Amino acid sequence: AKARGRNGYRFYQPSMTGEGVERLRLETYLRRSIEKEEVFLNFQPQVEIDTGKLLGVEALVRWNHPELGLVPPNRFIPLAEDTGFINQLGQWVLVEACRQMVRWQEAGLVVPKIAVNLSAKQFERGSMVGTVAEILRETGLEPHRLQLEVTESVIMNTGDALAFINDLHAVGVSLAIDDFGTGYSSLAYLKQMPVQTLKIDRSFIKDISTDVNDEAIAIAIIQLGRSMNLSVIAEGVETEQQAAFLLRHGCNQAQGFYYSRPVMPDDLLQRWLP
Ligand code: C2E
Ligand code: CA
Ligand code: CA
Ligand code: CA
């Protein structure tokens, strides 16, 4: 089934055929998505709350299949992880994100930083740090402009996480802990790592002005970040009230629909780069 959404894209919805059949079909299509040039990146601004200044962007992958329409990442990323395709896809995303940054720079536009998501499978690969260094060299992007996002569960479940993160740090890229607060991280362990940023998970931001527990968690993460000398960004900020709450409690960085949805590079230019 397909429904035409905004932007003229059709959105993929699983059909009534068995899940297994559907999955197999999706897997077959996904495998060819890069060569068929069906994947592309959207970019979502990260904003300084009090000034509205652009601090960076997060790259988010999109897959538009001619028959299926736009398939949501929550559907194809897990599939890509299960099948191992995530290594190719992740590499494509990294290269494309770095290239886009260089294109912006060459056009005289300053996007200070780009954040790219890494899945567990990529993070665990021994060759990952080398790959990142090579991509930076080949595209010519300065390492400090690249931030990698990994979830805390990935860090906690990877045996050699500390070594990886130290190596990444040596290459000059920064690291953000994504969806912070939803996993179980050992603060003692975190403290040993050269991590720069905590990203407060959207689930805590959502009900910030109505749910006292969510408020308490958001405030605790902001204070934790401050005491560990980390920068803290809130994701999923949808309202002015949420932004004001964050600012009041010492968090001056946000990302979310209140500022912008993830957009194509040209749209980013129009709104954010005068
Ligand atoms: P994430 O890394 O937590 O990315 C943020 C997600 O929240 C994005 O969904 C974004 O569109 C959405 N979002 C941003 N602001 C708001 C908001 O104000 N309200 C709401 N309701 N949602 C907001 P998206 O693009 O569908 O991506 C979903 C997940 O798929 C990502 O979650 C990430 O885990 C994964 N993903 C996306 N692109 C990549 C990629 O290139 N590589 C990897 N490994 N994973 C990716
Ligand atoms: Ca992310
Ligand atoms: Ca996130
Ligand atoms: Ca999240």
Image: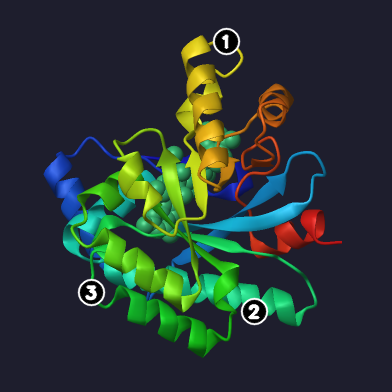
Q: Which residue is mark 2?
A: 102
Give the mark toward the camera: 1 or 3. 3
Q: Position of residue 261 (x, y in %)?
A: 63, 44
Left or right: where 237 falls relative to 163: right
Q: Which residue is mark 3?
A: 126
Whether residue 65 is visible: no
Q: Position of residue 82 (x, y in %)?
A: 18, 56
Q: Residue at x 44, y 66 (%)?
A: 38
Residue 165 placement: quadrant: bottom left
Residue 124 placement: quadrant: bottom left
Q: SS for tag 3? A: loop
Q: Mark 2, residues whose alpha carbon is within 10 Å: few (<14), some, or many (≥20)?
A: some
Q: Which residue is mark 1?
A: 210
Whether residue 231 is visible: yes
Give the mark toward the camera: 1 or 2. 1
Q: Is ligand 1 closer than 8 angstroms to the Cβ of mark 2?
A: no
Give the mark toward the camera: 2 or 3. 3
